Amino acid sequence: MGLQLNFFVYAQLAKTGLFLHRSVYDSSEIIYGVVMKKYILAILCMSILCLFIGCSTEKISTEKLRDIEFTVVPNKDIPEELEEMIDEKDEEPFKLTYADDGTLYIAVGYGKQPTSGYSIKVTELYETENAIYIHMNLIGPAKDEKILERATYPYIVVKTEFIDKNVVFE
């Protein structure tokens, strides 16, 4: 009963204008409080989301577990399907992998070069916990080498044991 009476009295006084000024402050304070609560809730939700995303990332280790033995594949021994893929892409630099009968082929091309005399050297091929890493260098013509002034498309294909991991080209 007391609560109803107080509300009734407050409503009557507000109508007369005696509490009009105070009720404006009350409503702005209420609106400010609601906005701040929503703002704080949004920041809290974003923080929790970031925490879960950060906890779900996979650790990528680049620590070498072992070197992988490989052989450079002569053109005549490249699988036909891989050779077709290389022919389609040789105008631009490319990086391909191809698996066949327990063998992994890794192909890297350096696109169109202005002259002959280019070669490719595999500097490293190794396995990590998460991937296979291959490092290669394009070597230009030597100064004393006789070169032909025609476009070439240097690429290399290496063959190794099949390992079911992503290949990272560096």
Image (cartoon, rainbow, N blue to C red):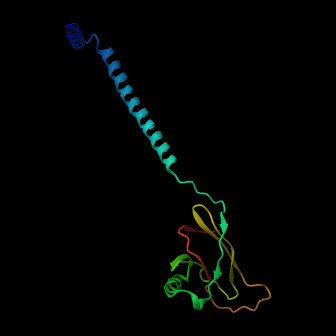
Q: Position of residue 12 (x, y in %)?
A: 20, 11
Q: Quadrant of residue 4?
A: top left
For residue 94, above or below residue 149: above
As drawn, the residue found furthest toward the front would be: 102
* Position of residue 123 in the picture relative to residue 165 (left or right): right
For residue 59, above or below residue 49: below
Q: Position of residue 6 (x, y in %)?
A: 24, 9
**Residue at 24% of width from left, 11% of height from top?**
10
| Number of callouts | 0
**Residue at 45% of width from left, 43% of height from top?**
49
Q: Position of residue 71 (x, y in %)?
A: 65, 81
**Residue at 79% of width from left, 85% of height from top?**
143
Looking at the picture, tell me which residue is in the foreground, 3 or 150: 3
Looking at the picture, tell me which residue is in the foreground, 161 or 19: 161
Q: Position of residue 53 (x, y in %)?
A: 48, 48
For residue 105, above or below residue 28: below
* Position of residue 17 in the picture relative to residue 121 (left or right): left
Looking at the picture, tell me which residue is in the foreground, 11 or 81: 81
* Position of residue 146 in the picture relative to residue 70 (left or right): right
